[in-house]
Amino acid sequence: MSQFSYQDGALHAESVPLADIARQFGTPTYVYSKAQLLQNFRGYAKPAQGRDALVCYAMKANSNLAILDILAREGAGFDIVSGGELLRVIAAGGKPGKVIFSGVGKTVAEIELALDKGILCFNVESIPELHRINDVAGRLGKRAPVSLRVNPNVDPKTHPYIATGLKASKFGVAFSDALDTYRTAASLPNLEVVGIDCHIGSQLLDDAPLLEALDKLIELIDTLAAEGIHLHHLDVGGGLGIDYGTGDNAPVAIGDYVSRVFARVDAWRAEKYEGKPIKVIFEPGRSIVGNTGVLLMSVEFLKPGEEKNFCVIDAAMNDMARPALYQAWMDVKPVVPRDGATVTYDLVGPVCESGDWLARDRELAVEPGDVLAMMASGAYGFTMASNYNTRGRAAEVLVDGDKVHLIRRRENPAELFALETIVD
């Protein structure tokens, strides 16, 4: 995380001390670095320059309007999974014509909205969904652009909750069924078959499974072409991981992976299609925003125990669900380190669940009132947050050099029950 570093003995975001942000905005608070966000996005965009390619940010990772606006200005497209996310893209100034709509359960209302706004493509995940989109498009007098999300049964060797390309996954069309499903799509009068899509999972540190899946997509495109079904784009999905500070193998560099994708695509097109290009689409999420953010949290109490020592913090599983949900290891650093002996603590929040922990067995020298930073919290942090125990969701702050912008204020309890009604 090059934009989060210790300077003069204190942890900074770019040029701003995180302790100053904690004092100004309180905790828990998410802090994002604009410079890191741009650096990560350009890791995809630079090797794609001059090519027929589109980087569609998977906004489920972090959908704050300020983040989306920055990426839209850089030319990003967006991978969405709900009608609400489409409305967020539009509110942030993104172009619907650069939007890919993924997800297994698109409603009629969401399909109508997407067709009305003119999205680039639906990533379709079942035959019933094909028929639903065809029916809606026919009723609206439109032709819907569709791509099939193909499940290649490639093992990404990641957490089972974020492995999406295996036979047991709810996602996608089985590779063995893909040809017949494409035949069905091509036969429906209100659909335009434009592409193929694949996403095998998240937090992949090695790109070998991604390239294996790419080879299977290429094989299927050739089979489809022989039947007269010609595709205009190849969507390789997302999935590249980030370094959470575990000390394990570093993730593959973004630019190296993108270059290997293009090398394979170019060799294939030169051999089979006389060099005729095909549009290549990427759907990165975590690798764009993961290391752009930290979660600031304050120490409330130190609670020694017979078997465990607990550091009780003001952030909780409702603020950052990844540790409780995935047993994820996330690095925690003191914003202003203390001298002295460390103690092994479990970092736990105030939520009334034994699963409310953010880190376990961490060596820390801390006192009540100290501020800690959970590193690499930019992805699947705020977007997975909840209001459990009537806790307002955290504030979000964007740092740009030496400037600090509040991009989402902290929720207060009255707002949380403002939509509820007491019945007489």
Image (cartoon, grey):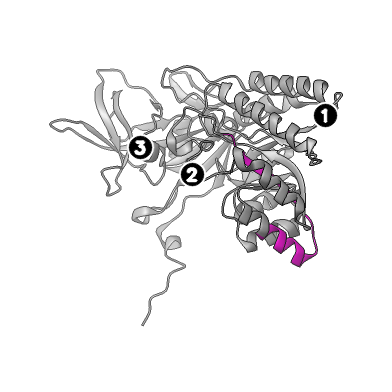
Residue 108 percent coordinates (x, y): 63, 63
Q: Mark 3 or mark 2, which is nearer to you?
A: 2
Q: Is 135 one of the magenta-colored residues?
A: yes
Please name the amino acid that badge 1 sits on.
Pro
Instruction: Say which element carries label 3.
Output: strand
Instruction: Say which element carries label 1.
Output: loop
Specify start and end residues of the magenta stretch as a single range.
132-152
Q: Which residue is mark 2?
A: 382
Q: Residue at x 42, y 42 (%)?
A: 26
Q: Considering only vertical position in the picture, is 164 above or below 205?
A: below
Q: Considering only vertical position in the picture, is 108 above or below 167?
A: below
Please name the amino acid that badge 3 sits on.
Ser
Residue 280 percent coordinates (x, y): 74, 32
Q: Quadrant of the C terminus?
A: bottom left
Between the C-alphas of marks 3 and 2, the distance is 17 Å
Residue 157 percent coordinates (x, y): 47, 27
Please name the amino acid that badge 2 sits on.
Phe
Q: Which residue is mark 3?
A: 298
Between the C-alphas of marks 2 and 1, the distance is 39 Å
Mark 2 or 1 closer to N-term?
1
Q: Quadrant of residue 111?
A: bottom right
Q: Quadrant of residue 29?
A: top left
The outermost residue toward the bottom is 424
Q: Residue at x 48, y 30 (%)?
A: 376
Local crowd at mark 3 within 10 Å, few (<14), some, or many (≥20)? many
Local crowd at mark 2 within 10 Å, few (<14), some, or many (≥20)? many
Note whether residue 54 is visible.
no
- Foreground residue among 323 and 387: 323
Mark 3 or 2 closer to N-term?
3
Q: Is 267 one of the magenta-colored residues?
A: no
Q: Which residue is mark 1?
A: 277
Compared across the picture, whether 300 is left or right of 384 comes to: left
